[in-house]
Image (cartoon, helix red, strand yellow):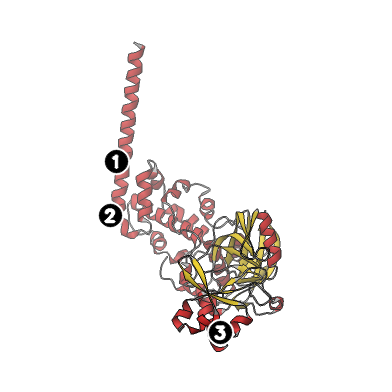
Amino acid sequence: MLRLAFLGFLALALNSCMITSKFHAERQADWLQILDRHGSLLNHKEELRSYIATSDTSYDTLQRLSTRQLKDIEKAAKNHGIPLKKYPLFLSLKKAQVTRSKEIESLLVADLILSVAAHLRFGIIEPKNVNPNWRSLKKRRISGKILADLKPDQYFQTKLELFAPQNPGYQRLARWIRSKDLEPRKADSLNDLRWRVMANMERWRWLQNQLGHSYVIANVANASLALVSDNKTVLSSRIVVGRLARQTPVFSSKIDHIVWRPNWTIPRTIWSADVLPMIRRKPSYADERDIGFFKKSRRRLSSIDNKHFFSMNKDEQLKAVAIQKHGPLNPLGDVKIGFDNQHQIFLHDSPNPNQYNSKQWTLSSGCIRVEKAEELAMLLEDLGQASTRDLHDGDRHVFRSLKSPIPIHIVYLSVWIDESGKLYQVDDPYERDSVMASLLIHSKRL
């Protein structure tokens, strides 16, 4: 008897589960049909499709969204300098006289939330539109699944604003924007402080959300570098960066090796534009600078003597690999700090300490010269648990890999606020602020 009762209860439970499952499937199908019919209105159709198709409760979340959330979305955007009035979807939803079904309204609001969250997290502008050598430092895709955590309640605005960078540098600029309660206008100069602050907030959004427990941050715009550990600045140093024609790019990577008393493999651009023309004009230049020539075959280098090099034609000379040995004239100085990147950029010492006292800091061919390079290298070896192995010249040339690579962020910040709340502005050496302000002003839609 007891067994029959249990089996009957099990059958009812299974039937209930089947009914519930069928209900969820029908509701999902309904929402997907609505999405297909009105997908042309949406910026995040595929993200919404994935969310609806993979979540049994997505329709419950979506149907709770309405134009009542617009006020909170508008506040969140304004607090971070996001020009919500450039969102056609926002303007359309603000028109109260427009008649639409509840489901369509919910999808439109969900799409607007995804757009604002994406712009808070990844930025509005694609970095390569400012400079072809600049790339986004993270994937610029937002998942529709975030809607499950953005249910309309009293904490909705706060949760939406959490998609913005939480590091102190960004948050101080955001507080400045909120305190002014002013929106920059098209009529304002592109160099107006409000536009410059917004441009620098945008650059913070391009960075990784977590800079690292210990990290190096090099600011190209004001020629400064800092090593930070446990939220404290361990070392600060002046730097020299790329000149206008060879600008230092913006990107993030991880410092994974240090070379003491390095040789310098001359980059192709410098070899073709600077060094090779000099050697052709003055053949003794190579010996004076201790530059050797090599032919690359697969992954091996074979030496080319000077007599053979000067008998080569121009194309053959251009393809040669030139290496300058460590010494008093080697531009890398006594240490090179390396990290993976497509630009062949690294940090290094310099044999000329006087250059750091100059008001002109855009002097290099793109790499970053560090005034306190040796001190920085030793600190990085401690933080990164350096291992040691000697290469080439025994005690002259030492390569050290870091067991725990240290993140490095090369940034371009022309306006910032320090811990005391003081705002600083520097010249815009690459003239990027006005470009970014123009993109923010003149973008037709977001």
Give the SS element for disc 2: helix
Give the SS element for disc 1: helix
Amino acid type at circle 3 is: Ile
Q: Which residue is mark 1?
A: 26
Up/down of 299 relative to 385, above or below: below
Q: Are marks 2 and 1 in contact (CB under 8 Å)?
A: no
Instruction: Between residue 189 and residue 390, name the one nearer to us.
Output: 390
Residue 155 appears anywhere in the view: yes
Which label belongs to residue 279?
3
Residue 191 appears anywhere in the view: no
> For the residues carrying marks 2 and 3, which lies nearer the camera in this image?
3
Q: Are marks 3 and 1 in contact (CB under 8 Å)?
A: no
Up/down of 219 relative to 12, above or below: below
Amino acid type at circle 2 is: Arg
Q: Tell me the CA gap for discs 3 and 1.
A: 76 Å
Q: Tell me the CA gap for discs 2 and 1.
A: 17 Å
Q: Are marks 2 and 3 in contact (CB under 8 Å)?
A: no
Q: Quadrant of the N terminus?
A: top left
In terms of sequence position, does the residue under pointer 2 or pointer 1 come before the other? Answer: 1
Quarter of the image holding residue 193? bottom right
In terms of sequence position, does the residue under pointer 2 or pointer 3 come before the other? Answer: 2
Up/down of 103 relative to 314, above or below: above
Instruction: Between residue 258 and residue 14, name the one nearer to us.
Output: 258
Number of disc labels: 3
Which label belongs to residue 37?
2
Q: Position of residue 309 (x, y in %)?
A: 51, 81
Residue at the spot 29% in from the left edge and 41% down from the top edge: 26
> For the residues carrying marks 3 and 1, which lies nearer the camera in this image?
3
Q: Position of residue 39 (x, y in %)?
A: 32, 56
